[in-house]
Amino acid sequence: MKICISAETTVDLTKELLKEYDIHTVPFTIIMGEEQGLDGDILPEDLFAYTDKTGKLARTAAINEFQYQEYFQKLLKEYDHIIHFALSSEISSACANATNVSHSEEFEGKVTVIDSRSLSTGIALHCLYAQKLARAGKSPEEIVAEVAKRIPFGQASFSLESVNYLYKGGRCSMLAMLGANVLRLKPEIFVKDGKMIAGAKYRGPMKKVVLEYVEDTLKLFPNPDLEEVFITYSTAPDEVVEAVKARLVKAGFKNIHPTRAGATISCHCGPHCLGILYINDGPHPIA
């Protein structure tokens, strides 16, 4: 059986990794005033320039049922079964739309939708693991069962330069935004139970803040599967990314993937946002 591993563009994988792991994606729509385009065609720089010019935040539109229907139809011309990883249902309606389509008579038994309960490369971690299982000859049912065990252990978090984009996007109160800005706080956001939650607060230049955040994260989630880790950022100086990479090498991670957040994720986190993402459930060798 030929199994397709699929996700939305919020998976934030590089073109090289998408190709290496044969992962297919369907894009969110990005709306900037009267203009709109697809995530991937519109880049984070476009969003930040729009916000700087207008003071307004670009908006994202979830993939609708018709779009999923067309997407799944196209994939099933090449594959026998699709396992689709959706952006957390607590964050977007995309998961519900994909699930509804998968339950239709046309796709019943051919498409399985998994609520990732995560975002960005937190989703990618599960996609990579699923593809490894598929290449090991596991059935769709076995892959879904094995992935489901790991989803609660996903560690997805980010250090933000400011809360301005979260505020503009309605995910942060005016009081919290003003307080953070006055005190020059740089907050951490992490995913818990599929939702974005405020974490620690830091002060100082980006490199200092990011390295403190990385240390705190490794202490708080001390049982990583060392096989894969992502360094995902909207914008970040090369020296900061390299410093984080060096720390993860020291921690024992084998495959360290620096990746750029796409437009959908960057729309909510803003510039100068960086996170490390891994699965915090120890080694998972595939038999």
Image (cartoon, rainbow, N blue to C red):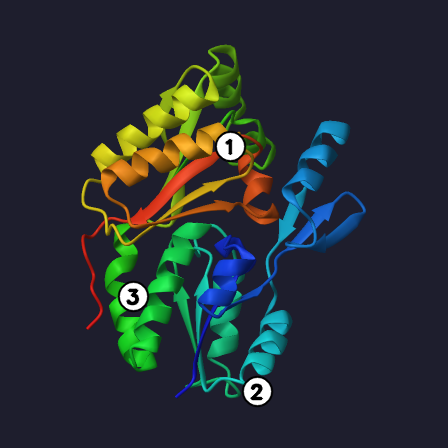
Residue 112 in the image: x percent, y percent? 41, 76
Residue 249 falls in which quadrant of the image?
Answer: top left
Q: Earlier in the sequence, mark 3 or mark 1?
A: 3
Question: Which three-letter amino acid code belongs to the residue tagged 1?
Answer: Asp
The disc placed on residue 172 is: none
**Which label sits on residue 77?**
2
* Quarter that holds the N terminus: bottom left
Q: Could you tell me how far apart the alpha carbons at marks 3 and 2 are, in whole angstroms?
A: 25 Å
Quadrant for residue 190, please give it.
top left
Q: Nearer the viewer, mark 3 or mark 1?
A: 1
Residue at (72% x, 34% y) in the render: 49
SS at mark 2 in the image: loop
Residue at x-position 18% and y-position 56%: 283
Q: Residues within 10 Å of mark 2 (few under 14, many from 20)?
A: few
Q: Residue at x 76, y 30 (%)?
A: 54
Closer to the chain start, of discs 1 and 2, is 2
Residue that mark 1 sits on: 238
Three-letter code for the amino acid on which mark 2 is drawn: Lys
**Of 103 and 82, the residue lying toward us:** 82
Q: Are marks 3 and 2 in contact (CB under 8 Å)?
A: no
The answer to whether residue 159 of the structure is visible from this angle is no
The amino acid on which the numbered mark 3 sits, given as a three-letter code, is Val
In the structure shown, which secondary structural element does the residue marked by tag 1 occupy? helix
Residue 116 vs residue 165: left or right?
A: left
Tag in front: 1 or 2 = 1
Distance from label 1 to label 2 (Cα)? 41 Å
- SS state under label 3: helix
Circles 3 and 1: CB atoms closer than 8 Å: no
